[in-house]
Amino acid sequence: MPSRPRSRGQQDGPVVDLARRLGVLLGELGLSEIEASVGQIRVRLQRGGVQTAAAAPAPAVASVDHQVAPAPAVSDSASGVTIEAPMVGTFYRASSPTAEPYVSVGDLVKEGQILCIIEAMKLMNEIESKVAGRIVKVFVENAHPVEFGQPLFLIDPAR
């Protein structure tokens, strides 16, 4: 007996089911991004994302009502504080191609000062410093893509 072809609903069932469950958690917990893997299925939801579905290794991204820019991750290292990308996008050091960079190596920054912009899905997200101090290093070239958690700046905190 020939096997019956799988319908689209049956084929996408586990991915869609996982995405729906993660979407509920995203809303309930007030998160801007969530990722989970079950077997070979990997799903990542991000507010304001583009709807896509795929099995591992490519993540599936589903959209949620509005864009919320999460706070950049901050990690302490032996020589300073690393400001990391809070999202996937394109890194820009200035507000326009002809403008001066927000910050350069050696600049003193205040907590809350804009360091750069990450463009994600045509939205410009200002990334602010979470510490006061001096910019020691800029890890990313202007107009280059960045990944979630990728180091952007190293700041020597003010003592």
Image (tube, rainbow, N blue to C red):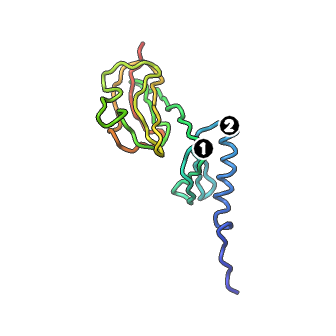
Lateral position of residue 75 relative to residue 15, left or right: left
Q: Are marks 2 and 1 in contact (CB under 8 Å)?
A: yes
Lateral position of residue 47 relative to residue 121, left or right: right
Image label count: 2
The label shown at residue 34 is 1
Determine whether the residue tagged by mark 1 lies in a helix, strand or loop.
Answer: strand
Q: Closer to the camera, 90 or 22? A: 90
**Quarter-of-image position of residue 26:** top right
Badge 2 is on which residue? 29
Q: Is residue 44 above or below residue 12?
A: above
Q: Residues within 10 Å of mark 2 (few under 14, many from 20)?
A: few
Alpha carbon separation for disc pair 2 and 1: 10 Å
Lateral position of residue 134 relative to residue 56, left or right: left
**Quarter-of-image position of residue 65:** top right
The label shown at residue 108 is none
Lateral position of residue 30 relative to residue 154, left or right: right
Callout 1 amino acid: Ile
- Spot occupied by residue 68 in the image (x, y as percentages of width and height): 56, 37
Q: Closer to the camera, 44 or 100? A: 100
Q: Closer to the camera, 32 or 73? A: 32
- For the N terminus, give its image quadrant: bottom right
Q: In percent of the image, x 41 and y 24: which residue is there?
A: 80
- Spot occupied by residue 61 in the image (x, y as percentages of width and height): 56, 51
Determine whether the residue tagged by mark 2 lies in a helix, strand or loop.
Answer: helix
Q: In percent of the image, x 47 and y 22: which residue is there?
A: 112
Callout 2 amino acid: Leu
